[in-house]
Image (cartoon, helix red, strand yellow):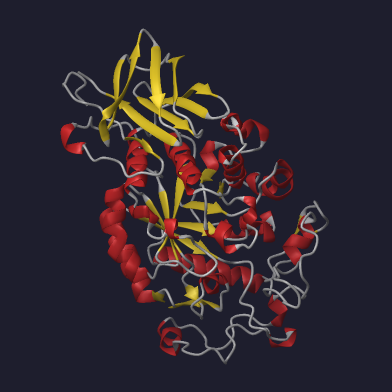
C-alpha cells in the first residue's frame, strides 16, 4: 500500500442501532487493505433452511457483502417441511429432501468455488429421525418413507435396504440428568412425555459421569459417518459444523477424524454451554482434543446479560479469563442462532429488544477475536425466527459492520473505556468502535493512546466525526447506538 498517497481511510459506520445509515460512500476514497492481512475465515453466514438452489442464487450477494463462509443446513435424506426435519436424518447415503438434490448441492459448491466462497455443511451424527417406531423397528431408512430416490442408490453403487438396524443404536431411554455427561452421551434427546426421543446411534459411551470414554462404538456406525463426510468433501464441501457434539464421546471424534479430515479443513462444533459450570463439564473435554473450533455459547450468554436491561458492559472486558468466552483462536462468535429460536426457553439467550441485538453484533464484528457468525433465514417459520432475521444478511447496517471487520482483520485490539453502559475500543492505530447501550446521549474525553491523531469518519454518515488531538479522544454518541470509525488521512 502506498502510504504516501492522499487517501481517506474510512469508517464504516456510526448510526442509531435502530435506524438505516446514510450512504455517503461516494464522498470517500477507501484505503486499500494492507496486503499482509489475511481474509481467511472472515465472517460466516448461516443460510438456515435455505434450499441449495436459493443459496446458489444468493452467493454473489454474499460475496459482495463481505462474507467468506456459508453454512448450509444438513443435506442428508430427510422428509417433511418443518425445519427440524433437517436435524433428524433418515439416510446418510442419499442427499435428497426439501433443500434439494445431490445435483443441487454439487452445483452450489461449484459456484461458491468460482466466487471464492467456502461452503460449510451442518452435520448431524448423534441420532436418527424420531419416526414413532417401536425399538424392534429401528431400520433406517424404513421402507415406508415416500419418494426415496432409488435411482440415486443405484448410481452410487450403494446397497439397497437399511443403513442402520437395531444393533446400531443405544438402548432406549431419555436424558434426565443433564449434569451427568455419561447419561448425556448414552441416552436420547427427548421432548415432553410421552415422546420416545431421537434414536441414539452407538457412537460410544463414557465409563462414568466424568470418566474416560469406552471405545464401544459400533464400527459400522463409524464407517457410515466417515463415508458420509468423505462424500461431502468429494462434492466440494469446505468445512463442517458438527451438531450435538456433547452427545458423543471425545474419543469418537478422534476416530472420526483419523486419516480423513486434514488439519487445514475447517470444522467447528456445537456444545451448548452457557455458564462456567457448563464450560468445565460439557465443553472442556472436547477442547482438549484440539480437533475443532466451537460455537462461543459462553460469550453469547455474556453478551446477552451485558446488553439486557440492568446488565453491565464491563462483563465484556476479557471474559475468556472467567470462562465466560472461548479463546478467540477457536471461537465462532454469535448473537443468536436457530438453537435460540427453536427452543421454547430460548436457552436463556433471547434478547427482549432487537436494538440490543444490533449493538451486540457491532461488538462481535468490531473485535478481532473469533470468526463472527450471522444468522439469516429465508422466511419466517413457526416457532423459529422473528422477522428481523429473515434475509438478515442483506441488512445495510450489518453489511457496514462486516466491511469494518474485514478491513480491520489482523490489527490488534485495545480497550479505551468500559463502564456499565459505554464501551470504547480501538483496532490497530486507525480503527475505533464505540457502543452506547444507555437511553441517553453520552459525551466525554478519553486517553486514545495507540490511535493516530486526527479525524475519524463514519463512512455511512460523513457528517459524523470524532477527533483525536494530543492523544485524547473527544466523543459524543447518541443513545442506543454504536459507531465504527476509521481514521481519515489528509
Q: Is residue 8 above or below residue 119?
A: above
Percent coordinates x, y for residue 234 in the rendering: 40, 65
Q: Is residue 395 left or right of residue 158?
A: left
For the point 63% across and 45% down, the residue is 287
Camera sees residue 214: yes
Q: Quarter-wise, where is residue 109 in the image?
A: bottom left
Q: Is residue 222 left or right of residue 69?
A: right
For the point 56% across and 88% down, the residue is 161
- Is 22 or 331 nearer to us in this picture? 22
Q: Is residue 62 above or below residue 11?
A: below
Percent coordinates x, y for residue 5 in the rendering: 16, 21
Q: Quarter-wise, where is residue 280 in the image?
A: top right
- Is 378 or 91 nearer to us in this picture? 378
For the point 63% across and 63% down, the residue is 344
Image quarter where the N terminus lies is: top left
Percent coordinates x, y for residue 142 in the rendering: 59, 88
Residue ranking furthest to the top: 470
Image quarter where the C terminus lies is: top left
Camera sees residue 205: no
Residue ranking furthest to the right: 208
Percent coordinates x, y for residue 122 in the rendering: 50, 62
Q: Is residue 149 left or right of residue 103?
A: right
For the point 49% across and 34% down, the residue is 439
Q: Is residue 254 above or below residue 168?
A: above
Amino acid at each position: 500500500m502506498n502510504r504516501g498517497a492522499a487517501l481517506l481511510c474510512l469508517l464504516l459506520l456510526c448510526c442509531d442501532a435502530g435506524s438505516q445509515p446514510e450512504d455517503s460512500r461516494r464522498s470517500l476514497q477507501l484505503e486499500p487493505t494492507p496486503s499482509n492481512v489475511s481474509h481467511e475465515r472472515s465472517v460466516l453466514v448461516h443460510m438456515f433452511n435455505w434450499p441449495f438452489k436459493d443459496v446458489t442464487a444468493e452467493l454473489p450477494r454474499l460475496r459482495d457483502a463481505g462474507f467468506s463462509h456459508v453454512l448450509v443446513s444438513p443435506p442428508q435424506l430427510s422428509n417433511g417441511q418443518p425445519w427440524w426435519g433437517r436435524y433428524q436424518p433418515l439416510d446418510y447415503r442419499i442427499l435428497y429432501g426439501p433443500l434439494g438434490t445431490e445435483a443441487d448441492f454439487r452445483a452450489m459448491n461449484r459456484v461458491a468455488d468460482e466466487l471464492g466462497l467456502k461452503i460449510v455443511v451442518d452435520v448431524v451424527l448423534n441420532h436418527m429421525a424420531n419416526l414413532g417406531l417401536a425399538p424392534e423397528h429401528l431400520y433406517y431408512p424404513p421402507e415406508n418413507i415416500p419418494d426415496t430416490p432409488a435411482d440415486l442408490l443405484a448410481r452410487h453403487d450403494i446397497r439397497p435396504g437399511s443403513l442402520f438396524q437395531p444393533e446400531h443404536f443405544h438402548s432406549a431411554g431419555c436424558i434426565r440428568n443433564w449434569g451427568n455427561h455419561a447419561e448425556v452421551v448414552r441416552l436420547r434427546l427427548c421432548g415432553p412425555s410421552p415422546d420416545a426421543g431421537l434414536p441414539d446411534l452407538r457412537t460410544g459411551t463414557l465409563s462414568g459421569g466424568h470418566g474416560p470414554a469406552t471405545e464401544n462404538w459400533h464400527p459400522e456406525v463409524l464407517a457410515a459417518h466417515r463415508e458420509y463426510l468423505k462424500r461431502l468433501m468429494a462434492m466440494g464441501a469446505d468445512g463442517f459444523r458438527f451438531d450435538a457434539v456433547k452427545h458423543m464421546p471425545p474419543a469418537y471424534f478422534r476416530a472420526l477424524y483419523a486419516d480423513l479430515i486434514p488439519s487445514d479443513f475447517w470444522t467447528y462444533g456445537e456444545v451448548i454451554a452457557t455458564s462456567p459450570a457448563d464450560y468445565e463439564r460439557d465443553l472442556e473435554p472436547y477442547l482438549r482434543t484440539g480437533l475443532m473450533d466451537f460455537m462461543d455459547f459462553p460469550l453469547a450468554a455474556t453478551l446477552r446479560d451485558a446488553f439486557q436491561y440492568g446488565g453491565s458492559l464491563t462483563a465484556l472486558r476479557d471474559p475468556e479469563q472467567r470462562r465466560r468466552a472461548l479463546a478467540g483462536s477457536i471461537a465462532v462468535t454469535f448473537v443468536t442462532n436457530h438453537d435460540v429460536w427453536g427452543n421454547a426457553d430460548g436457552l436463556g439467550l433471547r434478547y427482549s429488544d432487537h436494538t440490543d441485538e444490533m449493538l451486540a453484533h457491532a461488538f462481535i464484528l468490531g473485535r478481532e477475536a473469533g470468526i463472527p457468525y450471522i444468522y439469516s433465514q429465508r422466511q419466517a417459520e413457526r416457532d423459529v425466527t422473528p422477522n428481523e432475521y429473515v434475509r438478515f444478511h442483506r441488512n445495510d447496517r450489518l453489511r457496514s459492520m462486516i466491511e469494518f471487520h474485514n478491513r480491520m482483520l489482523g490489527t490488534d485490539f485495545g480497550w479505551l473505556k468500559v463502564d456499565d453502559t459505554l464501551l470504547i475500543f480501538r483496532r490497530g492505530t486507525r480503527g475505533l468502535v464505540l457502543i452506547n447501550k444507555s437511553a441517553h446521549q453520552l459525551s466525554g474525553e478519553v486517553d486514545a493512546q495507540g490511535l493516530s491523531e486526527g479525524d475519524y469518519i463514519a463512512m455511512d454518515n460523513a457528517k459524523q466525526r470524532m477527533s483525536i488531538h494530543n492523544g485524547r479522544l473527544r466523543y459524543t454518541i447518541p443513545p442506543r447506538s454504536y459507531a465504527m470509525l476509521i481514521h481519515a488521512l489528509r
